[in-house]
Image (cartoon, helix red, strand yellow):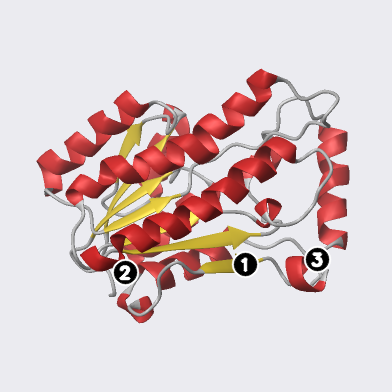
Amino acid sequence: MRFKDKVVLILGGNSGIGLASAKAFAAESGIVHITGRDQATIDAAVVEIDGARGYRADMADLAAMEEMISAIEAQDGRIDVLFVNAGVGGFAPIRELTPEDWDKVHDINLRGAVFAIQKALRLMGRGGAIVVTGSIGGHGVLPGNAAYGAAKAGLAMAVKIIAAELVGEGIRVNMVSPGPIETPLLHRNPGISGEAVAALREQMIAAVPMRRMGQAEEVARAVLFFASEDASFVTAANLFIDGGALELG
């Protein structure tokens, strides 16, 4: 029961890694709040997570994020754990990449993530933990991944800098960087057909030494480690959860 009476906010907690993490936090007695952009999946997730509250809030919409933070303040008065997990994909070769594609990916994956942390900090204090979802896509080379890779690479550096700024306040900031994981995000890349997604999935598996996709629950276990007192002497770390793809692939 590492999170008994701890207030946990998961941005992008309505599916995939976020949902798996929300269930795990709730199983360890956390007081769980989740956000998402789709009300139907938020409602479904809340049913699955014991005692959870859900909010429809796009991480790129700073006004919506502020409203959601204020709602948590009114209910619980604080945030002990912040998991910044919301994100979007966006594969496009450089000849086809548009400014609109770039802005959409960066508005959520980089700008939105950074300012979500900023807004949540007013409810966080000593002993707090922030975990951010990165990606091996921000460290390795994958053709067609310029927008997404640049956003995640920028986020990885932002996390280190934020960790340095907050270490004196007793707030730890760490990142998990998954490799290929079986989540709905893989199937939400605009402009990519179902056949292309299947081919991309096989390409990803071939690049993983363990020769399989990871599961959301495998990432969630690392998230809970960073969020707990088990990681009390860990900050500014980036854990690659990728079956060896980045270092051994």
Q: Residues within 10 Å of mark 1 (few under 14, many from 20)?
A: many
Number of numbered tags placed on the structure image:
3
Of the two numbered discs 3 and 2 in the rendering, the one whose residue sits closer to the viewer = 3
Q: How far apart are marks 2 and 1 (CA)?
A: 24 Å
Q: How crowded is mark 3: few (under 14 residues within 10 Å), some or many (20 or more)?
A: many
Q: Is residue 41 above or below residue 169?
A: above
Report the residue marked by disc 1: 240
Q: Which image quarter: residue 147?
A: top right
Q: Kindly state the secondary structure of the residue where label 1 is placed.
A: strand
Q: Distance between the residues labelled 1 and 3?
A: 12 Å
Q: Is residue 142 above or below residue 129?
A: above
Observer-nearest residue: 45 or 199? 199
Report the residue marked by disc 3: 208
Q: In this view, does 167 lie above or below 49?
A: below
Residue at (66, 52) in percent of width and height? 138
Horizontal side of residue 107 vs 234, given as left or right: right
Of the two numbered discs 1 and 3 in the rendering, the one whose residue sits closer to the viewer = 1
Q: x and y percent of residue 202 in the render? A: 86, 52
N-terminal label among 2 and 1: 2
Instruction: Look at label 3 and name its amino acid.
Output: Val
Report the residue marked by disc 2: 28
Q: How far apart are marks 3 and 2 (CA)?
A: 31 Å
* Quadrant showing the N terminus: bottom left
N-terminal label among 1 and 3: 3
Q: Can residue 17 be seen in this view?
A: no
